Image (tube, helix red, strand yellow):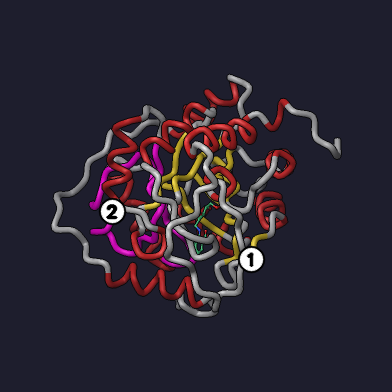
Amino acid sequence: MDADEDVAPAVRSILDAARQRDSPAADRVSVNPRSLDDAVAAADADGRTPVIAEVKPTSPTTEGTRTDDPVELARAMVDGGAAALSVLTEPEHFGGSPEYLERVREAVDVPVLRKDFLLREAQLDAVAADVVLLIARFVGDDLADLLAAARDRGFQVLVEVHTREELERAVDAGANFVGVNNRDLAKLEVDLATFEDVAAHARDRTDATLIAESGVSTPDDVRRMRRAGADALLIGSAIMDYDTDERSSSSPRSASPREDDGADPAATVRENTERLTTAESQRGDNE
Ligand SMILES: O=C(O)c1ccccc1NCC(=O)[C@H](O)[C@H](O)COP(=O)(O)O
């Protein structure tokens, strides 16, 4: 499979950077992970929607870069009820770093997902995390081997898919956490119907934990994804308080720091998280 085929230029650039990124001459990581399934169950039992809140300094579809301390933002997300966290470690397009993840994981006690574009086994050793992401489209035929290599190190593995065909590959590889990305990496457009379609198909195929990823902005969106069968939701931009711009893939991304509107960023992030983790105890306009 050619992962570059038909992807947006920004995503091609992400992949090129991932291929060129040196694998650190680090020791093999060995993780004693915090259970993601337990964290999801605990949130459910507590009446909170299980949300994996994402520390996302920037992205190809957001304006500017957040320079706030990732640890403060992470703590605010947990205070707002996040069941788990996701931390971008991709430096060039998302402003992340393995060091951010290390600091965040030390500061909180919930599971932490390493969000990156991993293509080779050695890249798993950059930093310890509770969960790592493998994107089915990008790892192609290496999915089963990388899944095994990650599990050998103790990681839980979230396999990201966007289509029914990718779901089949994830199931065949033995994935027990499947993320359905509502963001089409070919066009960078978001459509929540993607999760609805793939999750409906998944029900007969797997009992994996199903996670709705990307484009969830409002309590209505949360309830919609839960009705469609999401066990948990991965939410970045709406919690980080970005105005997302699912821009055409040729638009340039601003590298300038994001303008601060004077508000307390950690307080805003906490409120945003709380609004989404309590979505199911609020009454929806359409219900
Ligand atoms: O977020 C982007 O702009 C993006 C562009 C190209 C490839 C991946 C991208 N996002 C990675 C993610 O997985 C999201 O950060 C995550 O699912 C959260 O999405 P959102 O809630 O829409 O910020």
Who comes first in sequence, dot 1 or dot 2? 2
Q: Residues within 10 Å of mark 1 (few under 14, many from 20)?
A: some
Residue 27 % position (x, y): 14, 49
In which image quadrant can residue 118 be found?
bottom left
Magenta residues? 112-138
Task: Kindly state the secondary structure of the residue where label 2 is placed.
Answer: helix
Which one is nearer the viewer's eye here, 235 or 158? Answer: 235
Whether residue 132 is situated above or below residue 276 in the rendered picture: below
Task: Kindly state the secondary structure of the residue where label 1 is placed.
Answer: strand
Going 50% across and 74% down the picture, which residue do you hit? 252
- Indicate if the residue with disc 2 has its beta carbon within 8 Å of ligand 1: no
Residue 245 % position (x, y): 61, 63
| Amino acid residing under circle 1 | Glu
Q: Nearer the viewer, mark 1 or mark 2?
A: 1
The answer to whether residue 41 is visible is: yes
Q: Residues within 10 Å of mark 2 (few under 14, many from 20)?
A: many
| Residue contact at pointers 1 and 2, CB within 8 angstroms | no
The answer to whether residue 156 is visible is: no
